[in-house]
């Protein structure tokens, strides 16, 4: 049996390492419920749903099985500057609108006449 040269042994080791890496399962993605994603983004869960439906935030599943990958939260935060989020929050507070509110009034702060 002949000994292999260091270059050949190194090439074999590299090829074996690549083959093993391809067969190992990738790191598992963490998936969040809508409420968990909302807490991380500091928004209401309805806002998370709007982001998902608008295509701003990636999600998998549908209905009660809708899940947001943790990596999608990181992508969203990276793509959205904190100034944009703060301006959006100020605008919502100023107008007093809530998701799904047709009148723009927040429960109980309008006068009855």
Image (tube, grey):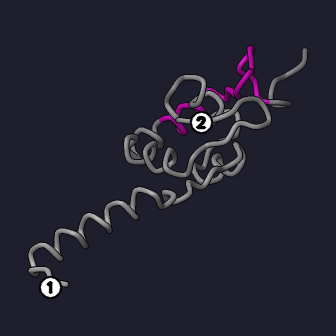
Q: CA distance from mark 2 to mark 1?
A: 54 Å
Residue 57 pos. (x, y %): 52, 35
Where residue 98 sits, quadrant-wise, is top right
Q: Which residue is mark 1?
A: 3
- Please report the residue visible at 74 percent of the width from the left and 21 percent of the height from the top: 100
- Residue at coordinates 41% horizontally, 38% vertically from top-left? 84
16 sits left or right of 64 in the view: left
Residue 100 appears left or right of 91: right
Tell me residue 70's x, y (percent).
55, 52
Q: Residue furthest front?
A: 1
Q: Quadrant of the N terminus?
A: bottom left
Residue span colored magenta? 88-106
When the figure is inspected, residue 19 is found, relative to residue 35, above or below; the finding is below
- Residue 82 spot, x, y in % from top left: 41, 47
Q: Residues within 10 Å of mark 1 (few under 14, many from 20)?
A: few
Which one is in front, 90 or 64?
64
Q: Return the mark for residue 89.
A: none
Residue corresponding to mark 2:
59
């Amino acid at each position: 049996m002949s000994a292999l040269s260091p270059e050949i042994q190194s090439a074999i080791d590299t090829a074996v390492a690549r083959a093993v890496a391809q067969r190992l399962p990738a790191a598992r993605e963490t998936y969040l419920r809508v409420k968990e994603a909302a807490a991380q983004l500091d928004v209401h869960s309805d806002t998370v749903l709007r982001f998902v439906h608008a295509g701003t935030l990636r999600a998998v599943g549908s209905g009660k099985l809708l899940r947001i990958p943790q990596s999608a939260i990181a992508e969203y935060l990276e793509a959205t500057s904190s100034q944009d989020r703060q301006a959006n929050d100020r605008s919502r507070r100023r107008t007093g609108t809530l998701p799904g509110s047709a009148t723009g009034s927040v429960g109980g702060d309008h006068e009855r006449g």
